[in-house]
Image (cartoon, rainbow, N blue to C red):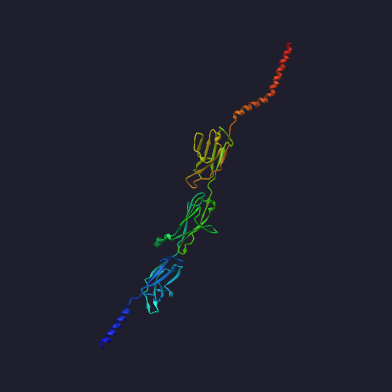
């Protein structure tokens, strides 16, 4: 064999060796929306063949080393991860007409977790009283091994519902404030008494609805006002008003004349549930009412009905004169008869002496 032929053989061998030792294109698997998802979410896998140019690849999909999905001509597949079963090691590989293949991608671990439960708490405890402010908090359970959730806790969105048969989703309004995981009801009224529940949403799925909590709303204790002696009263008299609150104890009593809160003074004596007014005068004629305050719940009573205290001017002096005149008028016939008899007696004596 000549030296020319030997050189040609060596050149061909070098080309073959170079072809055999050329690195395969690298496949990289990407997972969306995250490598950790909840059951029911849609997962998208993308197989990126790097350094291969614009070639017509077919794609093979593997889970835990086994074929997971039919071969595709697109670099992306999507599936609904309905069960924890979908957790596993996912990888991909690209082929060109079965003559050239990429490396199998590094496996990516997909973790599918059951949706957490949501629970509802109420502050203060039910029953609540009209006028109070109530906070309902939607708590989505966490597990110690869900460390990955700590970074995503703010991804949760919350929905709030009121109603038993026809549920109404609540939005922020004059008295309702929806602030992520908390619903605040200000100035509770009796129509707020109902079932409440919540749920959390993340991406395309939602947690199971929380157990419903029944919010019981009660009216504040009623207060009533009594007056002794009965109205109308007269100037110079002493009047006692008593505030009676139907339930609970340890009340502090507030007394009002129209819109002015009363305190003990020279003529006014405030003694817990009793207000005494001494030496009444015409300026005391007004509307009076009371209410109670306390440290516990309920912390106030309803306002009592307003009582109008009517003060009349005393006419005791005129009554005495009138009584005397009446007496004199009643006695006039008797006085007249007495005068006539005396006159007759006088004349009779006069005639006798003559």
Quarter of the figure with residue 286: top right
Q: How many numbered tags mark residues here?
A: 0
Residue at image location 66% in from the left, 25% down from the top: 328
Quarter of the figure with residue 24: bottom left
Does the image show residue 145? no
The x, y position of residue 247, in whole percent, is 53, 45
Question: Which quadrant does the C terminus fall into?
Answer: top right
Depth check: give the residue in front, 166 or 13. Answer: 13
Q: Is residue 90 placed above or below 286 in the rendered structure?
A: below
Which residue sits furthest bottom?
1
Residue at image location 71% in from the left, 17% down from the top: 343
Depth check: give the residue in front, 284 or 68. Answer: 284
Residue at image location 54% in from the left, 53% down from the top: 191
Q: Is residue 232 placed above or below 340 in the rendered structure?
A: below
Q: Is residue 77 placed above or below 128 in the rendered structure?
A: below
The x, y position of residue 137, in whole percent, is 46, 55
Depth check: give the residue in front, 335 or 7. Answer: 7
Question: Which quadrant does the N terminus fall into?
Answer: bottom left
Does the image show residue 350? yes
The x, y position of residue 313, in whole percent, is 58, 33
The x, y position of residue 223, in whole percent, is 54, 43
């Amino acid at each position: 064999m000549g030296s020319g032929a030997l050189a040609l053989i060596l050149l061909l061998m070098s080309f073959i060796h170079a072809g055999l030792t050329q690195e395969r294109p690298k496949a990289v698997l990407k997972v969306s929306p995250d490598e950790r998802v909840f059951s029911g979410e849609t997962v998208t896998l993308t197989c990126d063949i790097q350094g291969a140019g614009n070639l017509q690849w077919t794609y093979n999909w593997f889970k835990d080393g086994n074929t997971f999905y039919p071969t595709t001509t697109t670099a992306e597949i999507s599936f609904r991860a309905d069960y924890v079963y979908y957790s596993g090691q996912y990888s991909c590989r690209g082929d060109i007409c079965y003559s050239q293949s990429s490396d199998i991608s590094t496996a990516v671990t997909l973790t599918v977790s059951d949706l957490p439960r949501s629970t509802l708490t109420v502050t203060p405890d039910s029953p609540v009283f009209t006028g109070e402010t109530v906070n309902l908090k939607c708590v989505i359970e966490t597990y110690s091994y869900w460390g990955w959730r700590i970074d995503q806790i703010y991804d949760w969105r919350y929905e709030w519902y009121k109603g038993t048969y026809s549920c109404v989703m609540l939005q922020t309004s004059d008295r309702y404030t929806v602030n992520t995981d908390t619903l605040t009801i200000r100035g509770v009224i009796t129509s707020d008494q109902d079932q409440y529940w919540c749920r959390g949403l993340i991406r395309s799925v939602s947690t199971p609805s929380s157990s419903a909590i029944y919010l019981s709303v009660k009216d504040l204790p009623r207060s009533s006002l009594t007056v002794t002696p009965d109205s109308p009263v007269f100037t110079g008299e002493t009047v006692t008003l008593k505030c009676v609150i139907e339930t609970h104890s340890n009340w502090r009593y507030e007394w009002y004349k129209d819109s002015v809160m009363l305190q003990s003074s020279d003529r006014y004596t405030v003694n817990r549930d009793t207000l005494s007014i001494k030496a009444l005068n015409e300026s005391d004629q007004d509307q009076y009412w009371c209410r109670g305050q306390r440290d516990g719940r309920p912390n106030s009573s309803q306002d009592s009905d307003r009582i109008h205290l009517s003060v009349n001017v005393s006419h005791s002096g005129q009554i005495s004169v009138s009584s005397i005149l009446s007496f004199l008028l009643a006695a006039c016939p008797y006085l007249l008869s007495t005068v006539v008899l005396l006159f007759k007696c006088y004349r009779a004596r006069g005639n006798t002496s003559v």
